[in-house]
Image (cartoon, rainbow, N blue to C red):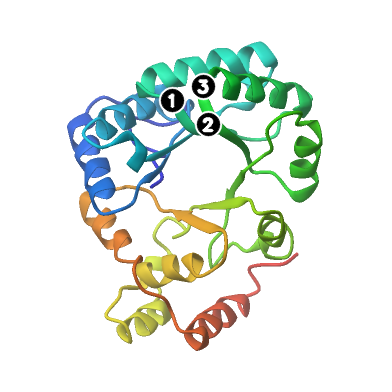
Amino acid sequence: MGTWGIGGGYWTPDYTRDAEWIEVLKTGISLGMTLIDTAEMYGGGHSEELVGVAVRGFSRDDVFIVTKVWPTNASYDSVLKSAHASARRLGTYIDLYLLHWPSDAVPICETVKAFERLVDEGVIRFYGLSNFGVRGVEEARSCSKKYDVVAVENHYSLLHRDDEDSVIPYAQREGLMYIAYTPLERGELARSKFLAEVGSRYGKTAAQVALNWLICIDNVVPIPKASSAEHVKENAGAMGWKLTKEDWLETSKKFSKKGLFRS
């Protein structure tokens, strides 16, 4: 589940819907959506606090918490400080810690050095990158001394397919997790008549088809936003079944014909 907008926006907290958001997250976890993606920037850390509250009622081994450090905090000391602050807000260790965007000011090797120390300290279990291309991922991996990059989180959906010929096949070849954010394009795909027609063959909605199309791709894990309990329940219905190869290819071809991927 993605948590952008939960607990506030860009570095600004919003406390008015805390109880609602906590219940939404709990609902998702109960339905098997156990990867929760947040960031220090989301609500200035308040999103992390809400995630921390939501996971308390579950076995820690059953949830996988991803959070991210902002590139202005990518220096060695700042990464350590940010990670410890995120862990405090979450009330637990971090399963996967990502650099949110590439930093123009800090060499990636300095950030990776801090990540590796955090693994040694037990603050994080794994580290990775967000909004990186193949070249950036390879550069980061070349810096690692003890622990390798395990995941990349980028924008990917039926309507945004820039990574199909680059980062995704690289992740598959190298055994990295590829986390796909904005998989429903802020609801646009949920309104697709074509996807609704495909879904009718399975008793599924357009949104569920769009998410299942991603789930069918090796190494790809979509993280739709946990926007409401109803949407979380619908999103959970994308799991436990698979599009046929014919329907997957038809769907892929239908959207690629719109010219919205491959530069």
Residue 45: image x %, image y %? 41, 23
> Label 1 sits on what residue type?
Tyr
| Residue situated in front as seen by the camera: 106 or 96 | 96
**Picture residue at 48% right of the left edge, 25% below the top:** 40
Residue at numbered disc 3:
122
Q: Are marks 1 and 2 in contact (CB under 8 Å)?
A: yes
Q: Are marks 1 and 3 in contact (CB under 8 Å)?
A: yes
Numbered disc 2: secondary structure: strand
CA gap, disc 1 to disc 2? 8 Å
Residue 253 got which mark?
none
Numbered disc 3: secondary structure: loop
**41, above or below 155, in the image:** above
**184, above or below 210, in the image:** above
> Label 2 sits on what residue type?
Arg
Residue at numbered disc 1:
93
| Quadrant of image for the C terminus | bottom right
Residue at numbered disc 2:
125
Which comes before the other along the chain, label 1 or label 2? 1
Characterize the local packing of mark 3: few (<14), some (14-19) or many (20 or more) Cα atoms within 10 angstroms: few
**Residue 173, image quadrant:** bottom right
**Picture residue at 29% right of the left edge, 65% below the top:** 237
Characterize the local packing of mark 1: few (<14), some (14-19) or many (20 or more) Cα atoms within 10 angstroms: some
> Label 3 sits on what residue type?
Gly
In the image, 196: left or right of 95? left
Residue 147: image x %, image y %? 68, 33
Which comes before the other along the chain, label 1 or label 3? 1
**Residue 139, image quadrant:** top right
- Residue 200 visible: yes
